[in-house]
Image (cartoon, grey):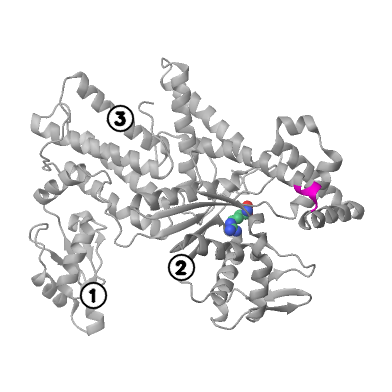
Amino acid sequence: MTISSQLEAKLRAASGHADARVQPATDTRFGDYQTNIAMILAKQQRANPRQLAQEIIDKLDTAEMCEPPEIAGAGFINFRLKPMWLAERFAVLAADEKLGISAPVRPKKYVIDFSSPNVAKPMHVGHIRSTILGDALARIAAFIGHTVVRDNHIGDWGTQFGMLLHGWKNELNHAALEADPLGEMERLYKLVSARCKEDPATLDAVHHELVELQGGNEENLVLWREMQRLSQAQFDVIYSRLGISFDVTLGESFYNQWLWKVVDELVARGIARESEGALCVFSDGSVPEKEDPFLISRDGQWVDMPALVQKADGAANYTTTDLATLAYRLREFAPDEILYVTDGRQQHHFRQLFAIFRRWHPEVSARLAHVWFGSILGDDGKPFKTRSGETIKLAGLLDEAEERAFAIVSEKNPALPEAERREIARVIGLGAVKYADLLPNRQSDYVFSWDKMLALQGNTAPYLQNAYVRIRSIFRKAVEAGINSQSSTIILSEPAELVLAKKLFQFGEVLPQVLDDCRPNLLCNYLYELASTFHSFFEACHVLKADEASRASRLTLCEVTARTLQRGLGLLGIEVPERM
Ligand code: ARG
C-alpha cells in the first residue's frame, strides 16, 4: 500500500467521507502530504473548516506514521511522516520487486490500439508518437497488474490501393522494388496521384482498379497481398528496433466481413438513415449542442454534421470499419477499456464513433477513450519535414539518432571498443528519441531538436541514463574496495536521505496516475525529479566513505534509486546502459 493510500484509509475512518484524498505537499516545509477534506465537508455542512479539521485530527489514528497533523490556511491538514516509520517502511520497499506498486483491487483488461500504420506507405514521423505512446501505456498497465491486448490496426484497405494497383501494373520498377519496397510503392502512389489530378482517364482507371479489388478480383487481390507482405516486413524491422511487440495485428480488411451487418443493424434500429444517397447518422439530440458530435456551429447556427457509414457509391468507410472493429474487440476480448492512440486530427472521428456505438450497443459499459496527441514540429514551427519538404521517415530518423549518439559517446569514451560504443549509442540514441516524444504533454505540439534531446543535462533520457550509470559505478567501486553492499537497517537521519527516500516512495503513487490520465509525461517528470534528488543526496552525503552503518543504508538508497530509474525508463520503452 502506498503512503498516500494508507493516509487516505485513515482519513476515511476519521472523517466518515468515502472519498477522502491526500496530495503530496506542494511546499515540503509544511509537511509531506496534505488534504483538503475538512474544507470539502465544511462546505457541505456549512461548518467552520478549521474546527472540522481539528475534529478530524482528534479522531485520526496516525500517531505511528506521522508527527501530530497540523492545520494550515483555510483548513488544510498537513502530515509530516516520522523518519523512524519511513526507515522501517523503506526496508520493505527495497525488498519489493514491484517498487511499491500493489496489485489493483480489480484488475482491468485494456485493449490498446496503437501504431496502426498504413500499408504501402512508409511509417513516418507522425506514426512514431502513436507507437511510442501506446507502447509506454501498454507497459505501464501491464506492470501495474492489468491485462493488456496490444492491437495494431493496420490501414490495409484505403482508397490508396486504386492508385497503387494502377501504378504497379503500369509503372513498376522491379529493381527499385527489390531494393526498397516501401520507397517504390510510395513513388508509384505519388506518381499516379499526381497524374490523376490532370488526367481524367487515369482517374477512371484508378477507380476501376479499386472497384475490382473490392469486388474480389483475383489478380488485384494477389498484388494487394504482396503489398501487405512487403509493408509488414518493413514495419517489423522498425518494431524490433524499437523493442515493440503486438498481441494482435489485424488490418482494416479483416473487418470487411461484418461491414454490411453493421450497416443493416444501424438502419434497422433507426440509427442510420438515407441522405443524398448515402447512409448517415444524425444527432439524436441527447446531449447539449456544444457536446454533440453530429452538429457543427456555422454563423451562430447549429447545423447537421452527420457521420457517413455508407457512401453514395455504396462503399463502407473508416467509420463503418471502426464500428465493426469495436464490436469484434468487445466480443473477442471483453475489455474494460479500449484506448485509441492517434493524432489529434482524428478527434472528431472518434467522438462520432463512440456516440454511434453507444446508440448501437447501449448495454456495453466498457470505457472508450481517444488518447490523442499533437504534432512534431520543425525549427520553423511547421510540421517536421525534410529540407525538400518530404515527410521524415522513421527508419532514417532512428539511424541519425544512433549516429549522433555515437559521436557523443566516442568523444566521451574514445578508449572503449567500437562495438561497445555502438551498443551504448543505440541505447542512448533510441532512448533520446522516445523520451523527447513522451516528455511534452501529449496534447501539445513539440519542436524536434537533436541537441536538446541528446543533451546530458536537463530533462532528457541521456541525463537519466547517466544518473543510472553513475549509481552503477558506485557499486563497481564498492566491489573493488571489497565492500559488502548487502542491504541492512535503514537509517534516515540526514535531510537529504529523508528527501530521497520520500521521493522513492512516490513511484507507486505516480504510476497509476500516469495510466488513469494516459500521460507518460508525468512519469518522465517524476524520474527527472528522482535523478535530481539523487544528485543532491550524493553531494550532501558520503556513501562509500561513510561509517559502516550509514554506508550500508546509503548503498540501499542508491540501489533502490537505480532500480527505480531502470524500471521507470523501462516502462517508457527505454533501456539503460551499464556505462556511457
Ligand atoms: N491507420 C490510421 C492512420 O494512420 C490510424 C488507425 C487508428 N485506429 C483506428 N481504429 N482507427 O491514421
* Majority secondary structure of magenta residues: helix
Label 1 or label 3, whichever comes before in sequence order: 1
Tell me where residue 415 sits by quadrant.
Answer: top left
State the image coordinates of residue 51 (x, y, percent, origin top left). Answer: 14, 77
In this rendering, which labeled residue sits more in front, label 1 or label 2? 2
State the image coordinates of residue 271 (x, y, percent, origin top left). Answer: 63, 79
Whether residue 24 appears in this view of the structure is yes
408 relative to 328 in the view: left or right: left
In this rendering, which labeled residue sits more in front, label 1 or label 3? 3
Whether residue 377 appears in this view of the structure is no
Tell me where residue 169 sits by quadrant.
Answer: top right
Amino acid type of disc 1? Met
Q: Which residues are magenta?
A: 217-221
Amino acid type of disc 3? Arg
Q: Is mark 2 within 8 Å of ligand 1?
A: no
Q: Please report the residue visible at 69 percent of the width from the left and 75 percent of the height from the top.
A: 280
User: Residue under circle 1?
Assistant: 39
Q: Is residue 42 magenta?
A: no
Name the image quarter holding the C terminus. Answer: top left
User: Residue under circle 3?
Assistant: 470
Q: Could you tell me how far apart the alpha carbons at marks 1 and 2 are, in whole angstroms?
A: 34 Å
- Is 202 or 376 nearer to us in this picture? 202
- For the residues labelled 3 and 2, say whether their Cβ atoms are less than 8 Å apart: no
Q: Is residue 220 magenta?
A: yes
Seen in the picture, residue 123 relative to 408 is either above or below; the reply is below
Q: Residues within 10 Å of mark 2 (few under 14, many from 20)?
A: some
User: Residue under circle 2?
Assistant: 366
In this rendering, which labeled residue sits more in front, label 3 or label 2? 2
